[in-house]
Image (tube, rainbow, N blue to C red):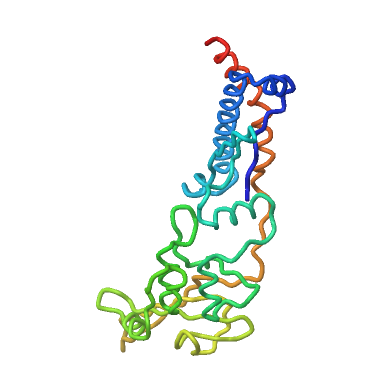
């Protein structure tokens, strides 16, 4: 779990608490909560600086939890938040590899993504406003390979009938198909399993067919890299979560406690 705790470290506060001074206890709890909220805000601002267009989902990953029994407050990944938040942020904080994403597990289960490999957006992948691969295209790829159910939690697999329909296209939409180039093989695109031999890097490609006008007319196709398979997905530490948090605590807790205690004492 990614979290940092705010605890009191003032000797005079500890002494007062032992004397069961209710005003001191209330002031301490308010100072802890206020400081933890400051830490959370500062962490969000830091993420906005070090990440490239972080999503609102990423920026809202943290929550403040107060523990009155331990006289502390924590800034941590939200309880019940999708586990990928913890996974992604942890790799950005400490560096190193990452766990499989849900769609990678679906591809691996289908036998398309070998163990020890990861899938990253290809040059022609559809990206959202934050530079991430669009959820719509991920679902389309998984649906094509009949792997949508373990990813989406519902039956959205295309089936052979659906694939044939999309290969043909319509008058207004070009036909297309996806195929996988597996590591160690030269596999092309007649179908999703096998086809013409081509020298392609491991990954998932989209073949789009279109008609052209010429002396004889005819059809051509373009192959675009959508997902590339790589053996490493390593991250360098970019987000100094603990350092930023500790600095914020040092700069704010004593002041927040003094202000809270003065307010309680004046009542």
View extreme (right): residue? 11
Q: Position of residue 191 (x, y in %)?
A: 45, 87
Question: Which residue shows up at 64% across the image and 26% down it?
Answer: 253
View extreme (top): residue? 266
Q: Nearer the viewer, residue 88 or 176?
A: 88
Is 108 placed above or below 38 here? Answer: below
Question: Which residue shows up at 55% across the image and 53% down it?
Answer: 85
Question: Which residue shows up at 69% across the image and 39% down it?
Answer: 243
Q: Nearer the viewer, residue 118 or 12?
A: 12
Question: Which residue shows up at 61% across the image and 63% down it?
Answer: 99
Q: Nearer the viewer, residue 118 or 221?
A: 118
Q: Position of residue 88 (x, y in %)?
A: 59, 55
View extreme (left): residue? 171
Is 55 placed above or below 263 here? Answer: below
Q: Position of residue 9 (x, y in %)?
A: 72, 27
Number of marks drawn: 0
């Amino acid at each position: 779990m990614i979290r940092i705790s705010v605890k009191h470290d003032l000797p005079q506060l500890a002494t007062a608490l032992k004397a069961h001074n209710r005003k001191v206890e209330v002031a301490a709890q308010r100072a802890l909560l206020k400081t933890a909220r400051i830490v959370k805000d500062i962490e969000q601002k830091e993420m906005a600086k070090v990440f490239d267009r972080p999503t609102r989902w990423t920026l809202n990953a943290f929550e403040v939890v107060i523990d009155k029994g331990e006289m502390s407050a924590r800034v941590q990944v939200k309880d019940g938040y999708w586990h990928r938040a913890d996974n992604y942020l942890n790799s950005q904080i400490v560096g190193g590899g990452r766990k499989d994403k849900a769609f990678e597990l679906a591809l691996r289960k289908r036998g398309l993504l070998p163990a020890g490999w990861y899938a990253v957006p290809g040059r022609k992948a559809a990206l959202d406003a934050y530079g991430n691969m669009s959820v719509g295209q991920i679902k389309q790829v998984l649906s094509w390979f009949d792997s949508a159910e373990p990813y989406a939690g519902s039956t959205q697999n295309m089936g052979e009938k659906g694939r044939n329909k999309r290969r043909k296209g319509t008058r207004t939409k070009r036909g297309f198909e996806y195929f996988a180039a597996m590591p160690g093989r030269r596999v092309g695109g007649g179908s999703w399993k096998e086809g013409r031999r081509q020298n392609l890097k491991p990954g998932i490609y989209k073949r789009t067919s279109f008609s052209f006008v010429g002396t004889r007319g005819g059809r051509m196709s373009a192959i675009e890299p959508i997902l590339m398979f790589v053996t490493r997905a390593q991250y360098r530490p970019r987000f100094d979560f603990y350092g930023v948090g500790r600095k914020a605590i040092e700069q704010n807790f004593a002041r927040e406690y003094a202000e809270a205690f003065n307010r309680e004492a004046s009542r």
